[in-house]
Image: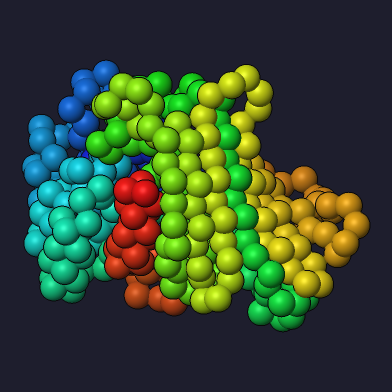
């Protein structure tokens, strides 16, 4: 029998997860809730059979719900996740886990104390490109890892397709370090183990309520030097580029899902065959999540793994 899912938050990420679960076919789309009525109406029109609840707590505690997926802004994650865990539901939460470290530590402790299964939506857990990089590191093809770089640039932040999530521009919960950098802190810890921040510098916008405009950070990941840099503003294409520099071969993950390699010459596409890498990653991730729900081996990221990432991200922003 398919596990039934309740969706908290029907913005960009919530709608995307709902659509991908529908495409995957392994889940029953049970209930949904969002404080914005228009978002609820769109989901009702596009997903026949899903029901809109009266409140978040009502759909979280509904007896026929097995999984609660949380796609609300970060500060609300603790409230919804703890209610779900106490109700015995599987907790599937968006990142970042939160913005207040003390609250997030308490969140992890409270959820773990209930014994419920839990995971955070980090697509890199199942991305084919990341799996390729990991295998090349393990089998020695990359050689010694000399360093890792992340370079970000957004002509506009938030990006155009995020216009409905105005909180992403706010310093208290948003910004591209939390929204994008979080994924790559998770990735370096996935590939190389626990990381620590050496130093960081952050430039914020003039308006006190707005998020960062530029940042620099140096990290150490088990002896491997890692540099992060990013900014927003100025015309031109967005840039999301993560490079692992090896003594024998280097690997560049760009535009989230595309992978190139170099053994000293030009960059070569690692996946020349046509494939929708983004959609492939979503389906692979949901395969892993369903395996977790069914008690089978999986590589999903736990709330505790997300807490480690959040601690570093918030330390960067405090720089």
- Numbered disc total: 0
**Residue 124 percent across, percent down from the top left:** 52, 57
- Report which quarter residue 112 is drawn in: bottom left
In this orientation, which residue lies closer to the viewer: 111 or 203? 203
Which image quarter is the N terminus in?
bottom left
**Residue positioned 53% across, 24% down in the render:** 233
In this orientation, which residue lies closer to the viewer: 102 or 278? 102
Q: Vertically, is 227 above or below 21?
A: below
Q: How is the image coloured?
A: rainbow
Q: Vertically, is 253 above or below 188?
A: above
In this orientation, which residue lies closer to the viewer: 40 or 241? 241
**Residue positioned 72% across, 81% down in the render:** 139
In this orientation, which residue lies closer to the viewer: 98 or 9? 98
295 to the left or right of 201: left
204 to the left or right of 52: right
Question: In the displayed image of the protein, which residue is found farthest to the bottom?
Answer: 139
**Residue positioned 76% across, 63% down in the render:** 250
**Residue positioned 30% across, 42% down in the render:** 71
123 to the left or right of 304: right
**Residue 127 percent across, percent down from the top left:** 58, 57
**Residue 60 percent across, percent down from the top left:** 15, 48
Residue 268 is at least partly visible in this image:
yes
175 to the left or right of 226: left
């Amino acid at each position: 029998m398919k596990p039934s899912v309740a969706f908290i938050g029907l913005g960009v990420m919530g709608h995307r997860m709902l659509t991908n679960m529908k495409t995957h076919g392994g889940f029953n789309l049970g209930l949904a809730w969002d404080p914005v009525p228009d978002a609820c109406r769109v989901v009702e029109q596009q997903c026949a059979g899903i029901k809109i609840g009266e409140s978040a707590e009502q759909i979280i505690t509904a007896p026929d719900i097995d999984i609660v997926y949380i796609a609300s802004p970060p500060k609300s994650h603790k409230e919804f996740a703890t209610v779900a865990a106490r109700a015995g539901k599987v907790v599937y939460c968006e990142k970042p886990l939160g913005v207040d470290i003390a609250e997030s530590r308490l969140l992890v402790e409270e959820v773990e104390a209930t014994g419920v299964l839990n995971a955070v939506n980090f697509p890199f857990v199942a991305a084919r490109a990341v799996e390729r990089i990991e295998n090349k590191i393990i089998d020695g093809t990359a050689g010694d890892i000399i360093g890792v770089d992340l370079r970000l640039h957004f002509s506009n932040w938030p990006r155009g397709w995020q216009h409905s999530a105005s909180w992403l521009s706010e310093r208290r919960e948003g910004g591209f370090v939390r929204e994008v950098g979080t994924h790559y802190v998770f990735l370096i810890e996935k590939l190389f183990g626990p990381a620590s921040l050496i130093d960081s510098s952050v430039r914020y916008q003039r308006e006190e309520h707005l998020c960062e405009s530029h940042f620099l950070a140096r990290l150490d990941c088990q002896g491997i030097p890692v540099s992060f840099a990013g900014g927003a503003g100025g015309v031109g294409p967005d840039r999301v580029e993560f490079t692992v520099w090896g003594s024998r071969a280097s690997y560049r993950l760009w535009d989230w899902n595309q992978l190139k390699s170099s053994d000293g010459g030009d960059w070569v596409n690692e996946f020349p065959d046509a494939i929708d890498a983004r959609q492939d990653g979503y389906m692979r991730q949901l395969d892993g999540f369903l395996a977790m729900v069914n008690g089978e081996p999986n590589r999903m990221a736990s709330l505790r793994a997300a807490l480690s990432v959040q601690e570093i991200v918030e330390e960067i922003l405090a720089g």
